[in-house]
Amino acid sequence: MKNLIAASILSANLTNLEQSIHECEQAGVDWIHVDAMDGHFVPNLTMGPVMVDACRQATSLPIDCHLMIEKPELLVPVFAKAGANTITIHPENNPNVHRTLGLIRDVGCVPGIALNPGTSADLIEPLLPFIDMILIMTVNPGFSGQSFIPQMLTKVARVAELIVREERPIRLEVDGGINAENIASLASAGADTFVSASAIFTHPKGILGGVSALRNALK
Ligand code: DX5
Ligand code: ZN
């Protein structure tokens, strides 16, 4: 599957979001990643459908929505209406995951499951027929700028094996502390979609420099 780079706007210049997104487009970013946090599932409060709508007005790139919120089913239709393309939910706080995944499909979005670092890879098995994407968190969710947890490499490899057995194209996304030093090892383990906030938006050579460094490391 083609390698994709998703820019998490959590570290973008939010005083000039349109400019940041246009620079991402020019740098060849594939997806815009929106981190929705509710202050309950994670200890941070960030962005919601209003921000997805603002991104939608600024770009036609796919918008990848990562919901780190309680009761995501209540907001899935609103995220979809705002312009979300993929919607990824966490199973850790959701006793009715299949129903929420079905809802994501019903509103016309691509459903994904995100696993926190402490959540077993095996939990994904009964969900595989219902998703088109798996997101492996490589930090504890909540903030950008945290350090990659190296033990997640074996988890990525394990999930990649489960995907092969499923015999269906399912994207394998990684998120948290991804940079030019670790991206190639994640690709070797089986990841194909790479989320980054700090390595793109705080790169000393700007957004273009950050994206180029990631792409070059993937070659
Ligand atoms: C963390 C978010 C990430 C975050 C990544 O909870 O899900 O998408 O923005 O930031 P970096 O790339 O700086 O670790
Ligand atoms: Zn994220």
Image (cartoon, helix red, strand yellow):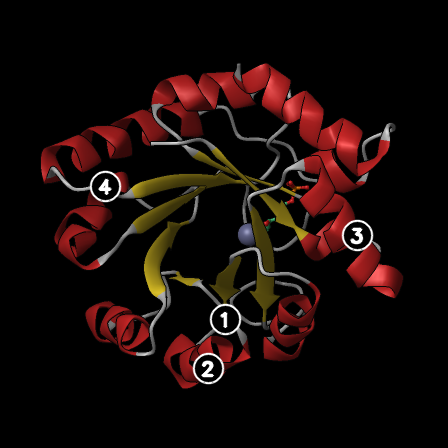
Q: Amino acid at mark 3?
A: Ser
- Closer to the camera in the image, 25 or 67: 25
Residue with the mark numbered 1: 69
Task: Say which of marks 4 and 1 sits in front.
Answer: 4
- Closer to the camera in the image, 124 or 43: 124
Task: Say which of marks 4 and 2 sits in front.
Answer: 4
Task: Say which of marks 3 and 1 sits in front.
Answer: 3
Tell which circle, 2 or 3, labels the residue nearer the N-terminal end: 3
Tell me the number on the disc at residue 203.
Answer: none
CB atoms at circles 3 and 4 under 8 Å apart?
Answer: no
Residue with the mark numbered 4: 169
Q: Secondary structure at mark 1?
A: loop
- Please give the name of the residue rendered at 64% of the width and 37% of the height, measured from the top-left corner: 28
* Above or below: residue 168 compared with residue 51: above
In percent of width and height, residue 132 lies at: 28, 52
* Above or below: residue 207 compared with residue 64: above
Q: Amino acid at mark 2?
A: Leu
Residue with the mark numbered 2: 75
Whether residue 202 sits left or right of residue 122 in the image: it is right
Q: Secondary structure at mark 4?
A: loop
Tell which circle, 3 or 4, labels the residue nearer the N-terminal end: 3
- Please give the name of the residue rendered at 50% of the width and 24% of the height, measured from the top-left corner: 150
CB atoms at circles 4 and 2 under 8 Å apart?
Answer: no
In percent of width and height, residue 200 lies at: 72, 37
Task: Say which of marks 2 and 3 sits in front.
Answer: 3
Residue with the mark numbered 3: 20
Whether residue 147 sits left or right of residue 219 in the image: it is right
Q: Amino acid at mark 1?
A: Ile
State how far apart marks 2 and 3 are (Cα).
Answer: 26 Å
CB atoms at circles 2 and 1 under 8 Å apart?
Answer: yes
